[in-house]
Amino acid sequence: MGKRAGTYHRWRRRLAPARNLRTPFFRLGLGVFVGLIGLILSFQSLILPGVLAVDGWWIEFNRRIFGNERAEYATHFLGGILIFGGIAVAISGYRMGLRRLREMLDPSTVNTGPGSGPTVMDAYKRRAQLALGPRVVAIGGGTGLSTLLRGLKNHTANITAVVTVTDDGGSSGRLVQEMGILPPGDLRNCLVALANAEGRMTDLFQHRFRDAAGSLSGHSIGNLLLAALIDQARGDVDEALRVASEVLNIRGRVVPTTTRSVVLRAQMEDGSELTGETRIAASDKRIRRLYLDPPHVEPHPAALEAIAEADLIIIGPGSVYTSVLPNLLVEGLANALNQAKVPRVYVCNVMTQKGESDSFTAAEHIMALEANIPTRVVDHVLVNTGVPSSQALERYRESAQEFVAPDIDRIHALGYIVVPGDLMSETDVVRHDPVRLANRVMDVLYR
């Protein structure tokens, strides 16, 4: 059974790029079949003389209904209807197939003129190659996870993004309070990062209403759309994400860590406790331990399934306390990661974050994981060795943020495999470069 299941899943992945063509092929085949039946009825004496019994029961049936003189005309009439009906169905299948093929291909890879780039077949081969790519699980939240996903989707279409659901600020926080749904912000960012839709559609998802928009001010259209889809699906987050994934034509899938509403709690070093992700991140106090409220929530079954079947697992990048650890605190998820027999990579941040990881080195990010998770969940640590410009460092210093020092020897001493590399992108902000980051992570799998 195991071998048969493996063969089934192998062929399913190979045929994945063409799964949207099944309906058009069915229509085309049905139209041809119906048209052939019509031809046989109308021209049976020429096509299949003596083979069909149509002259028997069919002509007799028509004679009883239409009379002797009109029986043969009724046969030709029905044959004509089937011929033209079959042609119409076949044409609709053909046109649907062309439309689905255009939708399936990445618009940026389609040839727009002679010698201007890859052909449609090249684009299809690329799509098939991605469908056969490794199964990757990426765990986190915030802008860090979406940055990683933008690079990963160029290596494989078999991506499962497991996203934190403790955001209680901004647009997401308002929708959580008003509708009692899971915070949609991080889910939206990951959907957009994996999208193959046209730029206008992704820009629309990310558009945020300005302050002058009244009750809509601060909301992004993507958050409102996800909230509407969840409401339409009567609270079914999975169905809402499925519909949004189809709209954006994403590579992979996005699932929340848990479908239960949870609140993040923190015990600070001075013994005080803070409740809520926003309050914890805004505090100047150092965090000692994190908790979920309620403490016992079940992880999303799709997240556990993806971890069990993964070829590579990536945790981060992102805020260690508010984007990474909330996922690992969900009961059962850390144990599933601990039992995984595939490379498990933690991606350390490039810059520290005020109120969370002040003055943290790369090793101290790992120590924060160990202090909150009773079991080891990673074996590789991806560390950025690129250094921002002095102007960028000065700009960040003004907002109490620093460069995360890559103390590789300390990480080695903790028992981890260090994967160094210049993974940085510097524009108006300093963050990971999606392409460099994804390439370096995939090196861990193929080394």
Image: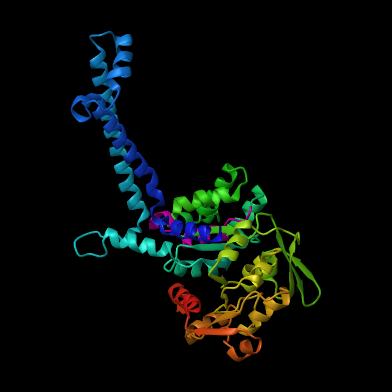
Residue 263 visible in rendering: yes
Q: Is residue 67 left or right of residue 201?
A: left
Q: Which residue is rendered at x = 61% and y = 84% of the image?
A: 416
Residue 361 visible in rendering: no
What is the span of residues highlighted in magenta in the rendered image? Answer: 182-202
Asked if residue 192 lies in the magenta stretch, the reply is: yes
Q: Which residue is rendered at x = 35% and y = 56% of the image?
A: 105
Asked if residue 84 lies in the magenta stretch, the reply is: no
Residue 4 placed where, x, y %? 51, 58
Q: Which residue is rendered at x = 30% and y = 23% of the image?
A: 53
Name the foreground residue: 126 vs 206. Answer: 126
Query: Would you identify the image quadrant in which residue 49 lies?
Result: top left
* Relative vertical location of residue 253 with respect to residue 412 in this rendering, above or below: above
Residue 113 placed where, x, y %? 21, 60
Name the foreground residue: 309 vs 252. Answer: 309
Q: Which residue is rendered at x = 43% and y = 69% of the image?
A: 155
Colouring? rainbow
Q: Quadrant of the N terminus?
A: bottom right
Residue most extreme to the bottom = 409
